Amino acid sequence: MINIFEVNETNKMIEQENLDVRTITLGISLLDCIDSDLGQLNRKIYEKITGTAKDLVAVGKKIEANYCIPIVNKRISVTPIGLVGGAACRTPEDFVTVAKTLDAAAKEVGVNFIGGYSAQVSKGTTASDENLIRSVPQALAETEYVCSSVNVGSTKTGINMDAVRLMGEVIRQTAEYTKERDSSGCAKLVVFCNAPDDNPFMAGAFHGVTEADAVINVGVSGPGVVKTALEAVRGESFEVLCETIKKTAFKITRVGQLVAKEASRRLGIPFGIIDLSLAPTPAIGDSVADILHEIGVEHAGAPGTTAALALLNDQVKKGGVMASSYVGGLSGAFIPVSEDQGMIDAVEAGALTLEKLEAMTCVCSVGLDMIAIPGDTTAATISGIIADEMAIGMVNQKTTAVRLIPVIGKGVGETVEFGGLLGHAPIMPVNPYSCEAFVERAGRIPAPIHSFKN
């Protein structure tokens, strides 16, 4: 039974500590839309999405009103379009028409983003996948709601270095195509290793082929709640610290579980998973970096940061997993630079570098996320950064990702403004030494020895 103390506690988290449900994401399978005729494919995709998601936004708003729980985003993820479009799309331009169909469907149903303009190429790349990948710069430049992701590695298959090299070029091209908007197209493009099938967070969400025809996945967030809880135990032992994070994560996740079950019931669509991630926003007091500061490091990036982040990530998962029937997605702590004011402050103070962020990704949920870099960074350097991050995911059997934004026309010391949840970011320096000879090698990096489990 829920008592009045718990009701008041939850209200305080929402009103004063930035607790929210970051997203309800409706995953939709498009496998039954596959058609060899491009016009028919686009028609089927539009009808499937608008039919399945027609009540998503309205239901989300009703749940917000009924329970006074902010639900920041309502989103859609679909089956990777590299697979869905293979029979009909013969050129990158053909895939762009599908991106525009996704965009039109997202606009019609009123969601914030639609994810799944994606390809899965961790072991090899089909002609369809390559056409989709090469279409990404134009697709992201000519759409408003579409998000794209490419999975180029996994613990089981290794790293497809041909795809890594191509993604460096594609990120550069996307930056050029959207340079009039501070290269913001790159903010909707993620490169993954070990991408999960049920991630509700953009820009990496897609509806995996192992999923049901439609599912409801929910992502919760509450960095401000965790920070406030830790303020009450300042100076206490690690045992007390860990117990406090676990208890707080449990409470946050219960809110997400309530919303997920209610959305599932009202929409008549099965509940998929809760993603336990602590996802920050640019709002003051809603920062993962501030939690690390409260744990005891002066700035994110100071000695001890990686250990503090590992502790936080683990305790969030331990507390949250007990509060939900099904847990999945990414789950843990996000460290996107532009979306976290504490991370921005750390970069501006000189405490946080790209190399330290890479070290932190060994123990957090995602990877190098929403990092603005100089616009003259070469495609080969971007590919090298991607390869490093994919290696961390592959060897450590975890999801890692890269979302870099080379801001055309800007350099270190300047700031780029993306707006909304994407925030703003100082442009970070990149190691100037070349890795071109490395990324120009053809083929793939083999899977690690510990991947052989059979």
Image (cartoon, rainbow, N blue to C red):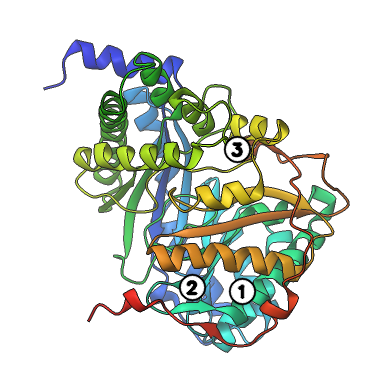
Res. 164 mark = 1
Amino acid found under the numbered disc labelled 2: Gly
- Along the horizontal axis of the image, is 252 left or right of 429? left
Q: Position of residue 259 (x, y in %)?
A: 30, 36
For mark 1, give the secondary structure.
Answer: helix
Amino acid found under the numbered disc labelled 3: Glu
Residue 139 lies in quadrant? bottom right
Q: CA distance from mark 2 to mark 1?
A: 9 Å
Pointer 2 or 1: first along the chain:
2
| Residue 296 seen | yes
Q: Write down the residue under mark 2.
A: 153
Give the quadrant of the C terminus.
bottom left
Q: Position of residue 60 (x, y in %)?
A: 40, 37
Does the CB distance between marks 2 and 3 fall below 8 Å? no
Which residue is located at x 68 percent, y 58 percent?
143
For mark 3, give the secondary structure.
Answer: loop
For mark 2, give the secondary structure.
Answer: strand
> In the displayed structure, would residue 162 be above or below residue 96?
below
- Along the horizontal axis of the image, is 118 left or right of 414? left
Residue 252 lies in quadrant? top left
Label 3 CA crowd tier, 10 Å (few <14, some 14–19, many 20+): many
Q: Write down the residue under mark 3.
A: 339
> In the displayed structure, would residue 325 be above or below residue 383?
above
Q: Position of residue 77 (x, y in %)?
A: 45, 58
Q: CA distance from mark 3 to mark 1?
A: 25 Å
Amino acid found under the numbered disc labelled 1: Val
| Residue 138 seen | no
Give the quadrant of the N terminus.
top left
Looking at the rendered image, the disc whose residue lies closer to the viewer, 3 or 1, is 1
